[in-house]
Image (cartoon, coloured by chain):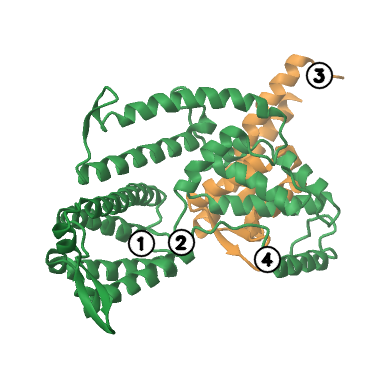
Amino acid sequence: MSSNDPLELIDQYLDRVRVYLPLDSEDAIVELQTHLIEEAERIGGGTMTAGSAMMAIERMGDPKSVAHEYAGSGEKVGPVPAEYVTPVSRMAIVLVAVVAALITGASLIGLTFPDLFGIQNWPFNIPVMVLINVSILVVIIGGISLLDRTKPMTEKTTLESVLGLGVEGFKPKGKMDAVGDVIMGVIFMFVLMHPAVLATLSVEFRAVVLYIVVFLLLGAIRGLLFFVGGENNFNLTVEGILSVVWIAIAMVLINIGWPVQYVYTNDGGVWALFDLVTFFETNNIPFISFDWIWAFIMFVTVAIAVWRVVVSTMKVTMYLRAGKGIWWQGNWGERRRLRGSLWRRYRSSRRVSQDETTYHDGYYEPDDSQ
Amino acid sequence: MSMSKKTQEELDRWSKEVKRGAVTLAILALLSKRRAYGYEAVKLLDEKMSFLALEQGTVYPLLRRLEKRELLASEWDYEDPQKPKKYYAVTKEGLMALGAMTKSWSDLSREMRDVIMEVE
């Protein structure tokens, strides 16, 4: 639904433009944002209103054309029009990465279904099924988007909402997520190293626990790197390498099985270790369910690791092509939003009103001394 | 005397070709005097180069291309967090290119003027 808040209108419009832009286009978005605000202020005689913002947006034009002009001379690929090449390829990569992640995860835990629902070679025919379903989806969405034609410029079309999922899939790691990686990595590292916890683990798991502790430490360092430098080639490479290492570790862990063999029990004020496996065996309860839980955990973590490998590889290649080198101050996943906290809005509105004296028409004659 | 449709079409086609060559020179020349951010550059060009009739859809991609070709360098100014500004300035390489382009343009205009005067 359209808002009456000019900043929100601009934000919504830029969200639409973002769908059609390549991944590394936050600079272009910010430049467009500044342009729209200043143009809206000029139209409004120094004050930005919902009406002046809408006029500025309409003057800028159709989001996909604006993005196309910004991204340079994109070319039509097969049946896909030039403006749609970026979001469609991004969406295709997301689907391929998801399928690759699921297949690797499934293969690792030995999930193969030679004949499921009468379909042969499961799960390797998933990509074909995805492709067929996506084609059907595109036709349906194309039909629906015809109904979107009357929507205002600031409102996403149905098609853009779907294509926008690709943008979400490639969002850089958020600053708070990076902090979370550091904190959780360090906590789990200390928990695993604690003698009271070590005592509960199976002998087989204890044999590899040091490797996992080292991995957790490296994971925490990766989190720290992302917190400091945001998304750049160095951090993405570290993330890719660590994800590959995790897949290798998971191949060992899956064969070890459920790692916790003992639990603590309190018997008359005395803590003692209770052997879970023996308890299950003596009572004829199959222990296999714990192994299934373990297999599921491994499946999820490996699927995430494969996803990270695909995304890191793609982004590093993209940044290298753009000549960005190895290390720079990159962005974090938190998208810049025009609407901030109340105090920021207050400060911003004060600033706008102070600037009114300078920006009578949204434009001032520059200082020659510059 | 009003122009015929054919003449108008021919003029439009010719203007487009002339503009294509002139726009790089115009941007480099304007930005060589002082740096400017995107919106400012659009307005400056609109004000001083009305013949080119440049819109933001032309100016921004061109600024990006010139930056990529290292004729322009950019710097972000976050002083106003709501309106961060990406300032573009001409590089040393850009100034050299501008000098060479200006000379070519002057030679061309002089020769063109002579040719046109002969016709007139």
Cβ atoms under marks 1 and 2 closer than 8 Å: yes
Q: Position of residue A335 (x, y in %)?
A: 56, 56
Q: Secondary structure at mark 2?
A: loop
Circle 4 Cα neighbour tier, 10 Å, few/some/many (<14 / 14–19 / ≥20): few
Q: Colour of chain B?
A: orange
**Label whose residue precedes the other's in the sequence (1 or 2):** 1
**Looking at the picture, does residue A116 appear above or below residue A310?**
above
User: Quick check: do tags 1 and 4 share a chain?
Assistant: yes
Circle 2 Cα neighbour tier, 10 Å, few/some/many (<14 / 14–19 / ≥20): some
Q: Colour of chain A?
A: green
State which mark lies toward you, 2 or 4: 4
For the residues labelled 1 and 3, the Cα–Cα distance comes to 63 Å
- Residue identified by numbered label 3: B3
Q: Which mark is residue A341?
A: 4
Q: Position of residue A259 (x, y in %)?
A: 21, 62
Q: Can the viewer see residue A6?
A: yes
Circle 1 Cα neighbour tier, 10 Å, few/some/many (<14 / 14–19 / ≥20): many
Q: Which residue is pictured at 60% across the width and 42% down the height?
A: A17
Q: Position of residue A19 (x, y in %)?
A: 55, 41
Q: Amino acid at mark 2?
A: Gly
> Foreground: B120 or A244?
A244
For the residues labelled 3 and 4, the Cα–Cα distance comes to 58 Å
Q: Which residue is pictured at 70% across the width and 49% down the height?
A: A10
- Residue identified by numbered label 1: A235
User: Quick check: do tags 3 and 4 share a chain?
Assistant: no
Q: Which residue is pictured at 78% across the width and 42% down the height?
A: A55
Q: Chain of mark 1?
A: A
State which mark lies toward you, 3 or 2: 2
